[in-house]
Each structure stands twice: as structure tokens, then as C-alpha cells.
Image: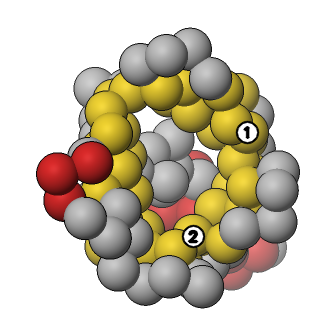
């Protein structure tokens, strides 16, 4: 009986502390089909998108809603991305692969 109680406590603690993280999506991503493009999601709700030519770097804000992230640029255009185990999947099919994680 003690072993079952101990196992249940360990399982709940690992689920609570390790598996569920609110900030698991924060970090740097590279575009799958064009690895020179990077997307950095920051803790303060802003992002930095660096295309092939760094002088066209784009800044904006993002909002996490459940398992999606809504990215809005300076002109007000919004793109929706789904959070996956390996990175982000845009609504147009582009896949961003996670490079670093907070």
C-alpha cells in the first residue's frame, strides 16, 4: 500500500513539475525549407523574425492561446501557428523547427 501511494505521489509530482510548462514554446526556431530564416519568441510577448537579409528584420508581438500562437506584425497582419512537439506549424503549412529553448 505504501509503495502505491509513493508511486502515485511521484507520478503526480513529475506531471506537475516536469511535463507541463507554460513557457515551453519560448526560444529560437528556424524555418524548415529556408534554415537561414530565424524566429525568436521572447518571454515578454514579443518576437524577432530575421529573414535571409538581416536588414529586413521584423519585430512584433505574439499571444499564446491554448495550443496556438497568434503572431502579429507591426502592420497588424496576424499569422496563426500551432505548437507541436518539434516546433511551430503555420496555417500556410510552413514548419518552424526549434533550435533553442528557454
Foreground pick, 51 / 27: 51
* Residue drawn at point x = 41 percent, y = 19 percent: 74
The residue wearing badge 2 is 96
State the residue lying farthest toward the top: 76
Instruction: Look at the numbered discs 2 and 1 and tell me whether their residues touch, using CB distance below 8 Å.
Output: no
The residue wearing badge 1 is 80
Under circle 1, the secondary element is strand
Question: In the image, residue 7 lies at what x, y percent?
Answer: 67, 75
Q: Residues within 10 Å of mark 1 (few under 14, many from 20)?
A: some
Say if 4 sits above or below 84 in the image.
Answer: below
* Residue drawn at point x = 48 percent, y = 26 percent: 73
Question: In the image, residue 11 lies at what x, y percent?
Answer: 66, 68
- Is residue 42 at all visible to an observer of this figure? yes
Looking at the image, residue 62 sits to the left or right of residue 70; the answer is left
Under circle 2, the secondary element is strand
Question: In the image, residue 23 lies at what x, y percent?
Answer: 44, 45
Q: Residues within 10 Å of mark 2 (few under 14, many from 20)?
A: many
Query: Could you tell me which quadrant the N terminus lies in?
Result: bottom right
Question: In the image, residue 96 lies at what x, y percent?
Answer: 57, 70
* Residue drawn at point x = 60 percent, y = 85 percent: 33
Amino acid at each position: 500500500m505504501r509503495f502505491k501511494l509513493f508511486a502515485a505521489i511521484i507520478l503526480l509530482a513529475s506531471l506537475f513539475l516536469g511535463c507541463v510548462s507554460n513557457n515551453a514554446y519560448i526560444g529560437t526556431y528556424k524555418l524548415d525549407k529556408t534554415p537561414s530564416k530565424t524566429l525568436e519568441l521572447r518571454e515578454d510577448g514579443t518576437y524577432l523574425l530575421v529573414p535571409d537579409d538581416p536588414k529586413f528584420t521584423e519585430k512584433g508581438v505574439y499571444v499564446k492561446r491554448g495550443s496556438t500562437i497568434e503572431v502579429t506584425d507591426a502592420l497588424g497582419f496576424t499569422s496563426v501557428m500551432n505548437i507541436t512537439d518539434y516546433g511551430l506549424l503555420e496555417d500556410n503549412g510552413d514548419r518552424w523547427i526549434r533550435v533553442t529553448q528557454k
